[in-house]
Amino acid sequence: MGFIERAGLGVPEPEHIALARPGARGETMALRDWGAPWSGAPQVMLAHANGFCAPTWVRTAAALSRHCHVLAYDARGHGASVMDTSAASLHWNIMHDDFINLLEVLRVAGRLNGAVTAVGHSMGGAAVLCVAGRRPDLINALIALDPVVWWPEMLLPS
């Protein structure tokens, strides 16, 4: 029994959402859903930092769930997600594609109504920024806490 279970913080069990993009080959992302306090409540998706997982957000999610429909996911190589974790698959662009695909799958399934407010910390902050830039139709507002960002010059050989 881990800290979260001993503390009785009420973390929802992970639900495995099958990705629906070419090359996913049965990969699933673990999703935690704190539910909606009422029909049509604002939707919030939480994205964790590198080395963490969705239950990291348990106290934040518990507080927000009184006012919002709160969801959090485990990124590739983290938590309960069942995905390829070879070195080639752990590229940030692939992880951002995973996040985009998760939001698309949830919308098609009727689990999300339109765009979400996305909140991310560190790696999750970078994810919400990149997804908002690539697919602004999926995110209506965002909060990026200490996001990992870089500018083009950083990618040039020194």
Image (cartoon, rainbow, N blue to C red):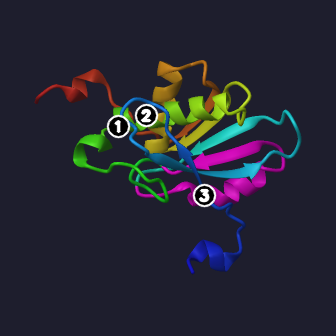
Judged from the image, the secondary structure of the residue bearing numbered disc 2 is helix
Of the residues tagged 3 and 1, which is closer to the observer? Answer: 3
Identity, as a three-letter code, of the amino acid under mark 1:
Trp
Whether residue 30 is visible to the viewer of this picture, yes or no, is yes
Name the residue type under label 2. His
The amino acid marked with disc number 3 is Pro
Question: How far across and how far down the image is residue 137, in percent?
Answer: 61, 18
Q: Which residues are magenta?
A: 51-74
**Placement of the N terminus among the 4 image quadrants:** bottom right
* Residue furthest to the right: 38
For label 2, count other residues whose C-alpha is less than 10 Å away and answer few (under 14), some (14-19) or many (20+): many
Q: Secondary structure at mark 3?
A: loop
Where residue 96 is drawn, which disc sits there? 2
Residue that label 3 marks: 14
Q: Quadrant of residue 56?
A: bottom right
Pointer 1 residue? 92
The first of marks 3 and 1 along the sequence is 3
Q: State yes or no: discs 2 and 1 in contact (Cβ < 8 Å).
A: yes
How many other residues sit within 10 Å of disc 3, few (<14), some (14-19) or many (≥20)? some
Residue at image x 39%, y 49%? 83
Q: Are marks 3 and 1 in contact (CB under 8 Å)?
A: no
